[in-house]
Every structure is written in structure tokens, then in C-alpha cells.
Image (cartoon, helix red, strand yellow):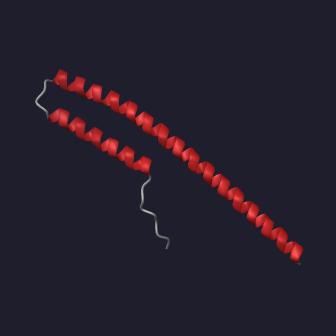
Amino acid sequence: MERQNAECSGPAIGLAFIGGVLVGAIAGMLLAPKSGQEARRAIKDYTDKTEDEIIEKAKEARAALDETIERGRRYVAEKKADVEAAVKAGREAQ
């Protein structure tokens, strides 16, 4: 049975961290001794700010994913060329 790699990518860890911060901040605001209107305003301000941060992190994660995909394509093309060259050399050697 193959071992599964339990490591997480940087963007995944960052998004998990931001999610934890968001949940903790909302819980703190809800439990704080503020009026309902003040608490709602604070939550809205925080969620607006966090939304912008999450969108930025998602863009960074997408760019990293695109780069990884491109590196994978180049690697496959290289290995394909190596195999084709080896097959050609093998045929010529016969």
C-alpha cells in the first residue's frame, strides 16, 4: 500500500489560518459586551476586510497552481523527448 503524503501546501495552510482567525474573531465579537448594532458593524467591517484578503490569497494560490501545472507539463514533455530519443537510439543500435 502506498503511503500518502500528509503535507499541506502553503496556500492551503494560509487559507486554513485565515479561516481560523475569522471564526475566532467572530466568536470574540459575539461574546464581547457590545450592543447588537455595534457587534454587527464590527462583524461586517471584519468580514469585508477578510473577504478582500481571501480573494488576494486565492489569486496567489491560483498563480502558484498555474506555475506548478506549467512545470509539470514541461517535465512531461522533457521525459517524453528522452523516451523518444532512447527508443530511436535503441532502434538504430539494432
Q: Quadrant of residue 29?
A: top left
Left or right: 36 with respect to 84? left
Farthest residue to the bottom: give it.
Answer: 94
Q: Give the farthest residue toward the top.
A: 37
Placement of the C terminus among the 4 image quadrants: bottom right
Residue depicted at 81% across the width and 69% down the height: 87
Determine whether 48 is above or below 71 in the image.
above
The quadrant where residue 91 appears: bottom right
Residue 83 rendering spot, x and y as whole percentages = 75, 66
Q: Position of residue 6 (x, y in %)?
A: 42, 62
- Look at 43% across and 47% down and name the residue there: 11
Q: Position of residue 86 (x, y in %)?
A: 78, 69
In the picture, measured across the screen, residue 74 lies left or right of residue 89, that is left
**Residue ID at (46%, 39%):** 58
Q: Judge from the rendering whether residue 72 lies leftward or rightward of residue 22; answer left or right.
A: right
Q: State whether residue 72 is above or below residue 86.
A: above
